[in-house]
Amino acid sequence: MDVFKDFHKYNNPDHPNNNECLRLRAAELETRTLKRLERRNDWLGFGAGILTLFMTGTPLEMVWQFGLGQKISNQTLAFCCAGAALGIFFLTSPWRHRGRVQKRNDTIAVIEKKLIELDCPCSSEKLDGSGGR
């Protein structure tokens, strides 16, 4: 990401709202970056949830299928059940955080609208950190 080239390209000292435009662009970059990181974290949680469910589900299935409830300790059984609950919690993270994603999208839309209202030179370009390449 070459964010500094983006900001240098949009810096126009002659524009009456230059500081506000750059501040809005920085807020947009921050919001887009957080959205990207949160989306990645949600899918990492999804993958961890699948692994956790597999690792705890197999012993629980063996307990159920072979009647091993008498042979293992209550602590081990509680650990497997807690792991299964944690796996379901991780597995549902992309769906549980839909409201947060929508809030980020709304924030980006408000920022883009303000950029257009202020007639900023950067209002028509999407800030993606590529430096215009």
Image: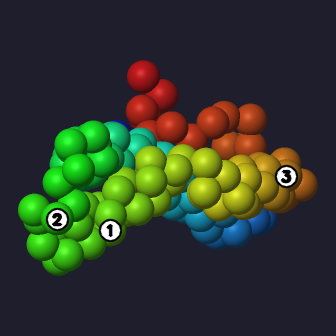
Category of crowding for the residue at label 2, using alpha-carbon neighbours closer than 10 angstroms: few (below 14), some (14–19), many (at least 20): few
SS under mark 3: helix
Residue to which mark 3 is pinned: 113
Residue to which mark 1 is pinned: 82
Earlier-in-chain disc, 3 versus 2: 2
The correct choice, above or below, for 65 with respect to 79 in the image is above
Residue at mark 3 to residue at mark 2: CA–CA distance = 64 Å
Category of crowding for the residue at label 1, using alpha-carbon neighbours closer than 10 angstroms: few (below 14), some (14–19), many (at least 20): few
Q: Residue furthest top?
A: 133
Q: Nearer the observer, disc 3 or disc 2?
A: 2
Q: Amino acid at mark 3?
A: Lys
Residue at mark 2 to residue at mark 1: CA–CA distance = 19 Å
Residue to which mark 2 is pinned: 70
Residue at mark 3 to residue at mark 1: CA–CA distance = 46 Å
* Residue 79 makes an appearance in the image: no
Residue 124 location, x and y as percent? 74, 35
Q: Nearer the observer, disc 2 or disc 1?
A: 2
The correct choice, above or below, for 131 with respect to 22 in the image is above
Residue 110 location, x and y as percent? 81, 58
Pick the quarter of the image with the C terminus.
top left
Q: What residue is shown at x 30% (from left), y 48% (from top)?
A: 64
SS under mark 2: helix
Q: What residue is shown at x 46% (from left), y 59% (from top)?
A: 89
